[in-house]
Amino acid sequence: MKIIKHIEDAWQLLQQGKVIAYPTEAVYGLGCDPFNEAAVEALLSLKNRSTHKGLIVLIAHWQQLTQLIAPISESQFAAVKASWPGPVTWIFPKSNAIPAILCGDHNTIAIRMSAHPIARQLSLHDPVVSTSANLSGHPPARNVSELALQFPVGIEGVLSGALGGASQPSAIYEVLTGKRLR
């Protein structure tokens, strides 16, 4: 498994439609270009993840959000602003720009603005898929050894860096209702 030390190398792999791994607040994530259907299909296949579930998209700044979601109220947006950047994922009504493969059986899109410096830098130019680095039904990888055990092939590189120290994956809330889903 190739270790990636420079963010520019990770960006290049994403632009080439490759799947990479990177540290987040609690676990390693797997990422790819969310607008490259072949890359998303490769990631889902790698994880043995159902296409019905949907995926999280990682962003680094507010301008990226507006292209991904349908309009929401100011009060709903206030709750999002209060929690970001941080380990909170919000489920939004999706914009027409979102590929169906990201949403699974839903008409919504899950988005997180991470506070983790590496995850945030990774999504600085473009949004990135962010899903836990694990085979479906297995615990998420918390180090490179666990990554290699679950994914001996299929990950083009691992962005080097430490996890953020959180003990649990991000909380998930529904923006229209404020209901916590995880």
Image (cartoon, helix red, strand yellow):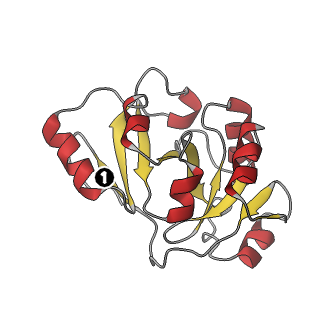
Quadrant of res 34: top right
Task: Tell whether 9 sits left or right of 64.
Answer: right
Quarter of the figure that contains the C terminus: bottom left
Q: Give the structural element (helix, strand or loop) at label 1.
A: strand
Residue pictured at 46% horizontal, 67% vertical: 169
Q: Residue furthest top?
A: 96
The spot of residue 174 in percent (x, y) is: 29, 46
Q: In this view, does 54 lie above or below 79?
A: above
Q: Which residue does the numbered mark 1 point to in the structure image? A: 173
Does any portion of residue 104 appear in the rendered image?
Answer: no
Q: Pick the residue in front: 47 or 99.
A: 99
Q: Residue at x 41, y 29 (%)?
A: 107
Residue 23 vertical position relative to residue 95 in the rendered view, above or below: below
Q: Which residue is nearer to you in this view: 31 or 54?
A: 31
Amino acid on which disc 1 is placed: Tyr
Q: Residue at x 45, y 20 (%)?
A: 96
Place of residue 32 in the rendered image (x, y in percent of width and height, measured from the top left): 66, 45
Residue 77 appears left or right of 47: left
Q: Residue at x 28, y 57 (%)?
A: 83
Residue 62 % position (x, y): 36, 41
